[in-house]
Image (tube, helix red, strand yellow):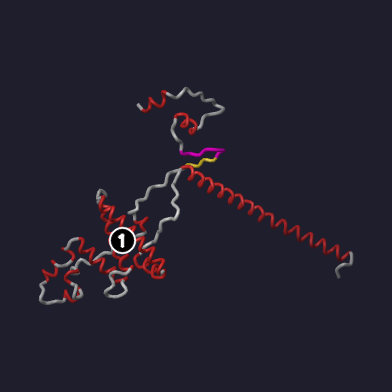
Amino acid sequence: MMYNRIFNIVKPIRVDQQFPLKCSNILNIIGMQSRTYIKDGVNIEWVPPPKVSCLDPSKSGDRGTLPKVDLSRPQIKFTRKKTPAEFLERQDISPEIKKVTSLEYAPVKYQIQAIKQDVLKSVQRHAFDCASLESTIACLTVKIRNQQRHTSVSKRDIISRVWCKENIERRNSLLKHLRACDYKRFEWLLEKLDLVYRPHPTIIEAVTRKGSIIKLTTIYCERMRNERLENYRKELEKEKVKFAAEKAELTKWIEEEEKQLGLRK
C-alpha cells in the first residue's frame, strides 16, 4: 500500500544520458529525505551517533568491576566483634558450622556486603568513618556496579534501572562537591575506586543533521587545508637546496667584484 501511495503521485521522470539524475534528487522528488550531502564532488554522509545508555560503565565512569570475594570467609554478621581469622581459629565451632556460615552458602547480598566493607576500609578516614564524602561515594560505587551487573542480565527490571540511574546522579553530585572542596582527595578517590568523573556539560546541544553536516564540512575543509599546506612545505623544502646554491654563487660573485673594485682586501 505504501509503495502504491508513493509512486502513484510521482510523474514520469525523463532521464537524459548527459545529465543523469542523482540519487538525492530522486529521493527528494519521491518525498524521502536523503542523509547525504552531495555538492561539487564532496560526499559527506551523516550517520546519527549511537545512543549510549546512562547505565553503561563507559558513560557512568566505572572503569572497574566488582572485586572477587573469598567465599571461604565467614559472613559479616559473625565477625562484627572479631576478625575473620579469629572466628576461623575458634575450637568450639565445628568445621561444618564454619562452612555453613561462610559466604559460599550465603545469599548474594551478603557477598556484596563483604565487598562493600572491604572497599570502605580502604577509603575511610578512621575505623568508625561511615558518613564522610569518601565513604558515601565508595558505598554508592559498590551499589552501582552491582546494579549494573544485575541490569545487564535482567534487562526488563525497570525498577533496578531507575535506582541505578538515581545512584549514578547522586554519586556525580557528591563527586562534584568533593572536587570543589578538596581536589587532591578527589583525585585520590578516583584513583582508588578506578573511576572517571564525567560532569554534565553546561550547555547541552542537540544533535541535528544540519549541525552535524556543518561540523563534518568544517573538519573536511580543515583537513584539506592542512594537506595543501603540507604539500607546499615539501615543495619549499625541495627548493631550499637550489636556493642555497644560488645564494652561494651570488655571494662569491659579490666578493670577487668587491676585490676588483678595491673595496675588500
Left or right: residue 13 versus residue 127 is right
Q: Position of residue 33 (x, y in %)?
A: 45, 35
In the image, residue 36 sits, relative to residue 215, either above or below, namely above
Q: Range of the magenta residues? A: 35-41
Circle 1 crowding by C-alpha within 10 Å: few under 14, some 14–19, many from 20: some
Could you tell me which quadrant the C terminus lies in?
Answer: bottom right
Left or right: residue 245 versus residue 204 is right
Question: Which residue ends up furthest to the right in the rendered image?
Answer: 261
* Observer-nearest of 124 and 146: 124
Left or right: residue 92 versus residue 144 is left
* Observer-nearest of 66 and 251: 66
Secondary structure beneath dot 1 equals: loop
Q: Position of residue 35 (x, y in %)?
A: 46, 39
Q: Position of residue 37 (x, y in %)?
A: 50, 39
Q: Name the residue at 59% across, 49% down.
A: 225
In the image, residue 203 sits, relative to residue 197, either above or below, namely above
Whether residue 249 appears in magenta in the rendering, the answer is no
Q: Which residue is denoted by mark 1 in the rendering?
A: 65
**Which quarter of the picture shows residue 55?**
bottom left
